[in-house]
Amino acid sequence: MRKRSGLARFSVRARTTITATVVVAVATMAIGFALVSYLDTKLTQELDTALDDRLRAATEAVRAGKAVPNGVTVDVTANEQRVQADAPRSGRTSGAGPFRTAEATVTTSEGTRTLVARASTESVRRATEAATRAMLIGAPALLAVVAGLTWFSTGRALGPVDAIRREFARLSARDLRGRMPVPAGDDAPARLAVTLNDTLDRLDESVRKQRQFVADASHELRSPLAALRTPLEVAQEHPDRVDWPGIVSGTLEDLDRLDRLVADLLTLARIDAETREGGEPTELAELITEVADRRTPANVERSLHLADSVVVRGHRTHLARLLTNLFDNAERYARQRVEVRLSVTRGRAQVEVADDGPGVPDESRERIFERFTRIDTSRQRSQGGAGLGLALARDIAALHGGTLELAEFSGGARFVVTLPLEPPPDEGNCGDRNQ
């Protein structure tokens, strides 16, 4: 077993909480430092603007011979007298230490004067320090709230998944009746529950059909075996009074029936395990003719009306079995005539097998396609098989992406098979392009 490392050692809930907290922490630090830097820059710019305004007012006062405003120092260059007083500095000039300064030179009749304005940056420092403290105090509290909310919300979100897991763990191959609780909404857990329930429905139906199939198959297998055993036991008890030719003939008939039943069961098992992939292009007209030529129905007239170049992709053996079962059914119940048509309808191959027999009651139009189903006395074992022919034919059609239906037909029964056509080869690169 491979050892997990890093966050993989934690649960989904813990990993989500850790990841969310780390992301928020990094984002908070980046945004906080950006805000403190912006605040410092903005306050410094406002301080420089105030210094510029004060220096401009002092310059105008000097030129007009008025008193210099408070906060501005006048340096008389002509007589080398210099006076300094506290005043802000402008951002247009640099200054070291906790002050910002701004200077301006004014020439008057009394000489050249230098005006200096300077102000302390203490207010800017206090504001940025206060913002930094607030960030350092608020960030842990924010991260704690984020971690708590993430842990809680993740637990709420994963709660339905855990409920689904617990319910799913109760299921077994013997009992698939349980269904997953579907949470409210249309999020991932709800869709997961719906998907699992749909899958369980199909599995439950499949298992139910499988069990019914096994029970029916066991019953159908017992019948010919019992029919074989009984006359042989009688013959063993009274060998001198047995019609041995009749015993042999009946035994062979029962063996033929048993052989057909086993073949049908094996075919059904193969079809249930196979997929549509792996088939080959099959010419239906050729296959229908081949199947028909192998048959010599007694007292039944058969007519074929086949279109040319109708190609489908599929398993040739299975398709031949489908046609054979339809021919068997039609010839078994036909009075005089069986008609087979092959055409292309709406881009799909269509095979119709019709007979002029007794037809099928409306209430049994779908039941005849169920396995081991016989709908009336005309389908007794002596006349038909085990009730697998039409079920097997429909399964083969479905395996090839097609359908088998009993169509409306007066004076008999008409079975219609539709199959997807084999796409023609790509000829886009062929032919003369200079047209």
Image: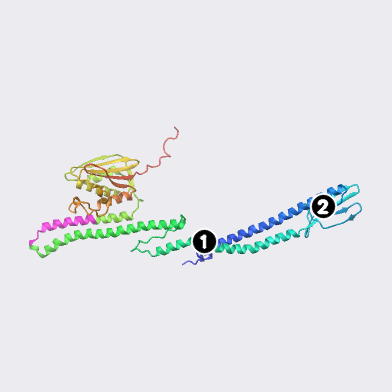
Mark earlier in primary sequence (1, 2): 2
Kindly report the distance in space between the C-alpha atoms of the residues bearing marks 1 and 2.
60 Å
- Residue 402 coordinates in the image, percent (x, y): 33, 47
- Residue at x 84%, y 57% (from the top left corner): 85
Q: Which of 193 and 235 is in front in this view?
A: 193
Rendering coords of residue 111 (x, y %): 90, 49
Q: Is residue 371 left or right of 435 when viewed as pictured?
A: left
Magenta stretch bounds? 241-261
Q: Which residue is drawn at 17% across and 53% down?
A: 382
Q: Which mark is on residue 254?
A: none
Residue 253 in sight in this render:
yes
The amino acid sitting under disc 2 is Glu
Q: Is mark 1 on a helix, strand or loop?
A: helix
Q: Image quadrant for the C terminus?
A: top left
* Relative height, residue 319 to residue 181 (above, below): above
Q: What element carries label 2?
A: strand
Q: Name the residue under label 1.
A: 153
Type of the residue with mark 1: Ser
Residue 99 placement: quadrant? bottom right
In this view, the residue in front, 321 or 59, is 59
> Who's the residue at 81% across and 51% down the image?
55
Within the magenta stretch, is there residue 247? yes
Q: Residue 103 carries which label?
A: 2
Picture mark count: 2
Question: On the picture, is 18 further left or further right than 351?
Answer: right
Q: Position of residue 100 (x, y in %)?
A: 78, 56
Task: Name the spot of residue 358 as percent of width and height, x first.
Answer: 20, 45
Mark 2 closeness class: few <14, some 14–19, many ≥20 residues within 10 Å: many
